[in-house]
Image (cartoon, rainbow, N blue to C red):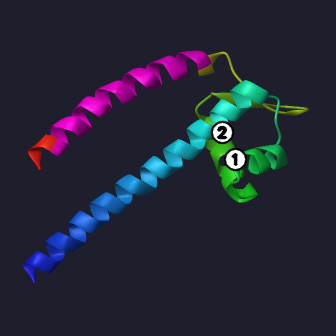
Amino acid sequence: MAYENDAQTNNSLSERLQTELGLLERHIQMLQVIRDEGPVGIIKLAEHTEFPQHKVRYSLRVLEGEGLIRPSPRGAIVTDRAPEFIIDFKELLEEMEDKIGDLYRML
């Protein structure tokens, strides 16, 4: 029985990691499209990214909440904070890459 619980925990941990990475990937993809093609609306974002409109809306709310985008009459645009975030986020990803390597070697 204890083994089954451990297996469920491991599965749950990996599923949570995959879910969170998927969300993060979607948010970053939205930010990239808005940065490169903005102003851009929900329909165009959904067509460009192939995500359903409800997921696009959620990502837009998250990005706006972080202060990375803002609405305009013609669609979402990046804020002045976005370039700094991108630089900082790339640094964080490099740090995480090292940590992931450490985790991999532990196994």
Of the residues shown, which amino acid type is indicated by label 1?
Thr
Q: In the orientation shown, which residue stands out farthest toward the bottom?
A: 1
Closer-to-camera residue (99/104): 104
Marks 2, 1: nearer the viewer: 1
Q: Earlier in the sequence, mark 2 or mark 1?
A: 2
- Residue linked to disc 1: 49
Category of crowding for the residue at label 1, using alpha-carbon neighbours closer than 10 angstroms: few (below 14), some (14–19), many (at least 20): some
Measured as percent of width and height from the top left, residue 58 is found at 65, 50
At a point 23% along the width and 73% down the height, the residue shown is 8
User: Dot 1 lies on which element?
Assistant: helix
Measured as percent of width and height from the top left, residue 43 is found at 83, 49
Q: Main secondary structure of the magenta part?
A: helix
At a point 69% along the width and 21% down the height, the residue shown is 79
Measured as percent of width and height from the top left, residue 55 is found at 66, 55
- Horizontal placement of 6 versus 17: left or right? left
Measured as percent of width and height from the top left, residue 67 is found at 62, 28
- Residue linked to disc 2: 30
> Which quadrant would the N terminus be assigned to in this image?
bottom left
At a point 50% along the width and 43% down the height, the residue shown is 24
Circles 2 and 1, Cβ within 8 Å, touching? The answer is yes
Category of crowding for the residue at label 2, using alpha-carbon neighbours closer than 10 angstroms: few (below 14), some (14–19), many (at least 20): many
Query: Which stretch appears magenta?
Result: 83-104
User: Dot 2 lies on which element?
Assistant: helix
- Horizontal placement of 62 versus 107: left or right? right
Of the residues shown, which amino acid type is indicated by label 2?
Met
